[in-house]
Amino acid sequence: MFAFSLDTKEETDIITYIDDVKNLESSKSNMGYRELRLINVHEIENLKYKIEESIKIYDNQGFIHLLDENNSIVTSTFISNIRIIKSKHHNITLSGYVWFTPRGFHKAWQMYLDNKITEKNIWKTFNKDELQGWIVFTGCLQKPQIYKENLIINIDGNNFHNLDGFYCSIGEEVNGIAGYFGRQLYSFYNCLHGDFGVKCILKVIWTNHLRSKKLLKNNYNKIIDIFKKYNIKVILK
């Protein structure tokens, strides 16, 4: 379930609930013009009225909210310069400049809300272009309370096929199911600095490392260098 609200800079005032929203994500950019299709808008006339009124006073920006089963807001997508493109039955198409989340982000959240993330490697069911969405989701979810010390990490090169898969894999090795441990080399480096569930890593055992070296190319060497900068012993098998 989704909801729509205008950006009033105050407490969120839900204008209407929406069964589904299409085109909310992008793997190409963080912000850009987009048309959003709102499926089965519950209070469609009220939504149209509120948007038209906001346009008159040049305050036409708002949020699409993903809701949980209690209609509490889980995550929100900002949209500005909102316009109604068309309206038919209970569906509305809006246009505006959307601050995108990566493809796969809402899919991951919905699986979590439906209690479908109960074991490791759920991320393997995601398409290649959805993995960044999974990783961003895990970063939002992650609130580590215990910081492990002298950790020994096992990495299996057969467990992933690209750099995003590496981040997914090591995230779960460090922090368990749907664990986060970086989504780029820079954030991976920062996680090793002491955030996100681990104070220090003693050793990394990387099996099938030659496969990883072939797949990750220069990024493989960069990852090894990052481990060494933190004085982490790396055993390659």
Image (cartoon, rainbow, N blue to C red):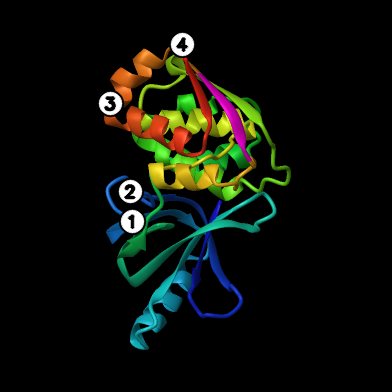
Of labels 1 and 2, the one closer to you: 1
Pinpoint residue 167: horizontal percent, then vertical percent.
Answer: 46, 34
Mark 4 and mark 1 in contact? Answer it, CB < 8 Å. Answer: no
The disc label shown at residue 30, or none: 1
Q: Residue at x 35, y 56 (%)?
A: 36
Pinpoint residue 188: horizontal percent, then vertical percent.
Answer: 46, 42
| Structural distance between the alpha carbons of marks 3 and 2 | 26 Å
Residue 204 lies within the magenta run: yes
Residue 139 lies within the magenta run: no
According to the image, label 2 marks what residue? 26
According to the image, label 3 marks what residue? 217
Q: Residue at x 46, y 33 (%)?
A: 228
Of labels 4 and 3, the one closer to you: 4
In the foreground, 114 or 192: 192
The disc label shown at residue 237, or none: 4
Q: How many marks?
A: 4
| Structural distance between the alpha carbons of marks 3 and 1 | 26 Å
Of the numbered discs 4 and 2, the one sitting upstream in the chain is 2
